[in-house]
């Protein structure tokens, strides 16, 4: 009776996937199994929390839209305001899990644990990882010592910050890593913490999903040698309010693209320089490109997809590039 109450919001992904045979670890359909069946499959969840499920979506996460983000965050925000909810778990496809986790970290004002979780193998496969990942997620969401740490991601026994974590590897179960390391570990229902997030999040955020109904269009264009300006111009023509440049190295920009980005900035579009390096990009102002002169923004350590999420949220509050840059340093 004194058990913590945890709500599982299910959105789809491989953790709800099903394959034709137990040998199908990589070839299967995502987003098939309803949340009540996932919960019924792990009776041990009752040892850590009183659990109930809600099916919010049943989708593969590569198709997660801005509207999906808003709907999900509003539901999470409503639940954490309830006295009979101690923590929330979100089951999610892994392809954009890092985007949703960061979005919730920015816009849900709460100290209660919010844990996003997925799996790399469907539940029908040999050595499926979803069962333990979900058990760990519920266990973390139910624990008092997980409060106030921002949105968390539990995969492969690690507890990572939803801000930092990214899918760095596919097809293997150690897929999610943070460039600054995990916050802790969860083992047999117990948390072991090693560090805390330093960036603003959840209850210390200036953003609030209760005040956000729509998100602007922010697009990502990928940098490489011989890159052209076609994608940037097309995004601008289609109404993008900001373009994240997924740059090479330090967020560098090929010389064929630089004049177009200057021109687009002159038309009011925010240009955000990030890096597409895999294990921890870090873009500094005025290194590689004169950001002060061009009035561009740098994404700090955020990968391009996370930079898109922060821009979506920030642009609901400001159109000023200096404010945008402050937000990119603080979150
Ligand atoms: N491992 C996964 O969850 C990937 C399945 C699917 N592409 C998704 O992101 O929903």
Image: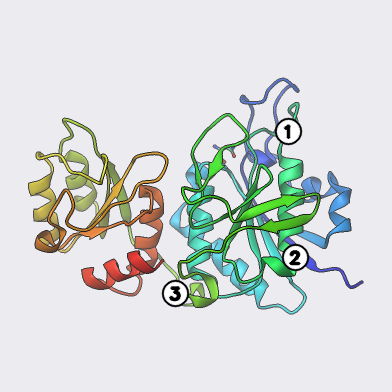
The vertical placement of 57 against 83, above or below, is above
Answer with the quarter of the image where residue 114 lies: bottom right
Residue density around tag 1, few if under 14, some if 14–19, many if 20 or more, within 10 Å:
some
Name the residue furthest right.
1
Nearest to the observer: residue 91 or residue 71: 91
**Marks 2 and 3 in Cβ contact (< 8 Å):** no
**Marks 3 and 1 in Cβ contact (< 8 Å):** no
> Does residue 212 appear to the left or right of 81 in the view shown?
left
How was this image coloured? rainbow
Give percent across and percent down for residue 194: 62, 58
N-term mark: 2 or 1: 1
Numbered disc in front, either 2 or 3: 2
Give percent across and percent down for residue 219: 31, 50
Residue at mark 2: 143
Which secondary structure lies at badge 1? loop
Numbered disc in front, either 2 or 1: 2
Give percent across and percent down for residue 56: 64, 56
The N terminus is located in which quarter? bottom right
Which secondary structure lies at badge 2? loop
Residue at mark 1: 128
Tell me what residue is drawn at x 81 percent, y 69 percent: 4
> Disc number at residue 207?
3
Give percent across and percent down for residue 305: 39, 49
What is the CA distance from the residue labelled 3 to the residue labelled 1? 37 Å
Tell me what residue is drawn at x 70 percent, y 56 percent: 192
Name the residue furthest front.
194
């Amino acid at each position: 009776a004194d058990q913590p109450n945890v709500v599982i919001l299910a959105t789809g992904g491989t953790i709800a996937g099903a394959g034709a045979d137990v040998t199908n670890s990589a070839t299967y359909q995502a987003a098939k199994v309803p949340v009540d069946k996932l919960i019924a499959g792990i009776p041990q969840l009752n040892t850590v929390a009183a659990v109930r499920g809600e099916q919010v979506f049943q989708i593969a996460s590569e198709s997660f839209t801005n509207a999906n983000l808003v709907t999900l965050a509003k539901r999470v925000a409503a639940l954490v305001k309830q006295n009979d909810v101690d923590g929330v778990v979100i089951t999610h496809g892994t392809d954009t899990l890092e985007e949703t986790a960061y979005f919730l970290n920015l816009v849900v004002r709460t100290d209660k644990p919010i844990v996003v979780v997925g799996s790399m193998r469907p539940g029908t496969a040999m050595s499926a990882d979803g069962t333990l990942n979900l058990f760990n997620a519920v266990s973390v969401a139910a624990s008092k010592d997980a409060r106030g740490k921002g949105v968390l991601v539990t995969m492969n026994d690690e507890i990572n910050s939803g801000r930092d974590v990214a899918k760095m590897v596919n097809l293997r179960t150690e897929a999610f890593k943070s460039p600054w390391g995990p916050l802790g570990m969860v083992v047999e229902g117990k948390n072991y913490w090693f560090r805390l997030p330093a960036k603003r999040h959840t209850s210390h955020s200036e953003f609030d999903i209760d005040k956000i109904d729509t998100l602007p269009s922010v697009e990502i264009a990928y940098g490489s040698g011989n890159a052209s300006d076609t994608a940037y111009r097309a995004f601008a023509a289609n109404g993008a309010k900001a373009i994240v440049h997924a740059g090479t190295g330090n967020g560098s920009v090929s010389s064929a693209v630089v004049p177009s980005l200057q021109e687009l900035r002159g038309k009011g579009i925010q240009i955000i320089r990030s890096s597409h390096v895999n294990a921890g990009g870090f873009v500094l102002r005025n290194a590689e490109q004169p950001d002060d002169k061009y009035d561009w923004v740098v994404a700090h350590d955020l990968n391009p997809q996370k930079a898109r999420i922060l821009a979506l949220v920030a642009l609901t509050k400001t159109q000023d590039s200096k404010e945008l840059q402050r937000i990119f340093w603080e979150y």
